[in-house]
Image (cartoon, rainbow, N blue to C red):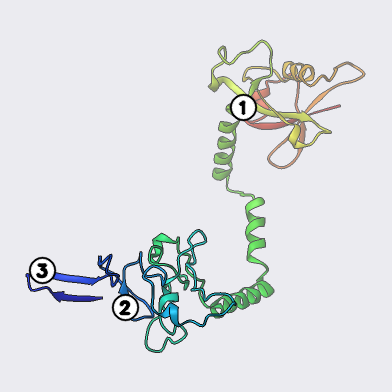
Amino acid sequence: MSVSDSGSGLVQVGAPCALPSCSLNDFLPIRCKCDKLFCRDHISPEGHRCPLLAQLPNTNGPSLKLQRCAVSSCNKPSLEGYIANAGATTQRSPALCPGCQQAFCAEHRDSKAHACAPLPPAGEPVQKNAAAKALLSKHFGSTSTRTSTSASHPAPTSNPKKLAQQRQLAVMKMRHKAKPADPKDTAASVPVNQRLHIKVRRAEDDLTSEQILWFRKTIWAGRALDALGSLFKMTISDTQPLNLLYNDADGTTVVLKTDQALADQIPDGASLALSR
C-alpha cells in the first residue's frame, strides 16, 4: 500500500488493482506471490490469472490449495495463504487475528466480523491457582462445599429483631397464598389486618403437605379445630379426639387449649399440626 501526492493536490491512499480490467484503487490492497497488488475481489490466483499458476508442475496429483478462511461458512482463501513463504515469519508479522490467532480472508479479518473468541491465558497461572485451591481445601475444606452448604442451610439467627423481621416477611408471603379455613369467611368480609395466617398439616405428614390458611383473629381454638378437622377430613369424637399442636420458640410442642382464642396462643404465621 502506498500514500503519495498525485500532483493534483489530492493524496492518493492505497494502490490500484494490478488487473488491467479492474484498476480499482483499493485502500487495503493485498500482495500476491507474484509480487503484484490486487483488490480483494481479484487476489485469488484464478481471479487475476497469476503467472505463477503456469509454473506449477503439471501432475495428476491434487492441486495446490491455499489455506481457507477460518469462518466455516466462507470458502475464500485466508490472507495468510497469499503471503509468499508463509512459513517464514522472521521478517513479517503473520496475517492472523491477534485475539484468536486464526487466519481469515479480507472480509472476515476484523475481529467483529468473525465473532472473535480470544484464547485463554497461559496454563501456568491456572495451575498455580489450582494448587492454591487444593492447599486451602486440604486445611480448611472445600470452598464450594462450604458455599453450597451455607446457601442451602443458612445458619439460624438468635437476634430477636431479625427473627421478627423473618417472621414478618414469611407472613407477607403467606398472605398471597392463604385461603379462608372457615367456610363462613370470605376475603371480602374480613380485612387483612384482622386475619391470623397459619400453616397446617397432619402430624404424620411431611412439611410439603402443609396448607396455608387464615382465620379471624377472634376465633376460638375449638371452633378453628372443628373447621380444620372438616377441611382435612379427620373426624372428631369422644373416642377419637383431635388436638391442635404448635411448636413454640423454645422447640416445645404445645397442645392448644380449645377454650381460648387462637390468636392468644400462637403468633401470626405459625405452623400447626393436627394429631390424634
Rendered location of residue 222, percent (x, y): 75, 18
Number of residues whose C-alpha sits closer than 10 Å to that of mark 2, classed few (under 14), some (14–19) or many (20 or more): some
Q: Is residue 154 visible?
A: no
Q: Secondary structure at mark 3?
A: loop
- Give the residue type at disc 3: Leu
Q: Is residue 225 left or right of residue 6?
A: right
- Real-space Cα distance between discs 2 and 3? 24 Å
Along the polypeptide, which appears first: circle 2 or circle 3? 3
Q: Residue most toward the right?
A: 239
Closer to viewer: mark 2 or mark 3: 2
Q: Secondary structure at mark 2?
A: loop
- Give the residue type at disc 1: Lys
Residue that mark 3 sits on: 10
Residue that mark 1 sits on: 177
- Give the residue type at disc 2: Lys
Q: Secondary structure at mark 1?
A: loop
Rendered location of residue 4, percent (x, y): 15, 76
